[in-house]
Image (cartoon, rainbow, N blue to C red):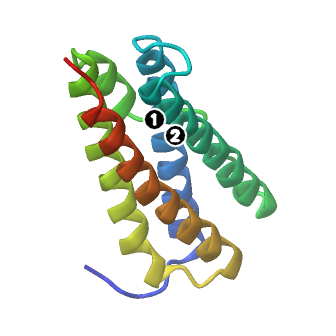
Amino acid sequence: MSTSTFSKAELCAFLNRMLETERAGAKALVAFMDEHERNGLAWTTLRQVQADEAHNCALLGKLLDRDGVPHSHATGEFHAKAVAVSGRGARIEFLIRGLGWAAREFNAALPRIADADANALITRMRESHLRSIEACRVAAGSLRD
């Protein structure tokens, strides 16, 4: 694995890939929330994670726009995989694995991101995902199914 700094094209490709992933998570979370009692612990947790994922999409899009780079409007494959999972607890566990994957991708990319704004954004997104994982673990533990 290369540890050299991302070229502009590589950085933009990474940001677009993560945009697709964040979009997939945000869309899947809307479906997940429908299975939980509104304003209950699991619903509230999933709603916050969904808001974070949607916000991340906007921030990634703005970063790409700043550089005049078209951003992807595709939805990552996580969405289809996530909504195919049955069971409230199983879905949250799948979400936790997806959030962990994204956090690892962010972590691996950070040393290669020389752009200060992009690096700061990816750092915040990684931290947000780690907080979401912990919150989802608590919510999953509260479920009876």
Instruction: State the residue position of label 2.
Output: 49
Q: Which mark is residue 4?
A: none
Which residue shows up at 50% across the image and 68% down it? 10
Residue contact between numbered discs 2 and 1, judged by CB atoms under 8 Å: yes
In this view of the protein, can residue 134 be seen by the observer?
yes
Asked where in the image residue 111 lies, by quadrant, the reply is bottom left
Amino acid at pointer 1: Gly
Residue 106, position in %: x, y?
43, 66
Residue 78, position in %: x, y?
35, 34
Which residue shows up at 44% across the image and 49% down it? 132
Which residue shows up at 53% across the image and 30% down it? 44
In this view of the protein, can residue 75 be seen by the observer?
no
Foreground disc of the pair 2, 1: 2
Instruction: State the residue position of label 1.
Output: 25
> As drawn, is 93 to the left or to the right of 31?
left
The residue tagged with tag 2: helix, strand or loop?
Answer: helix
> As drawn, is 43 to the left or to the right of 120?
left
Q: Give the quarter of the figure containing the C terminus.
A: top left
How many neighbours does mark 2 have within 10 angstroms: few (below 14), some (14-19), or many (20 or more)? many
Asked where in the image residue 9 lies, by quadrant, the reply is bottom right
Which residue shows up at 41% across the image and 20% down it? 32
Task: Depth check: give the residue in front, 121 or 51.
Answer: 51
How many neighbours does mark 1 have within 10 angstroms: few (below 14), some (14-19), or many (20 or more)? many
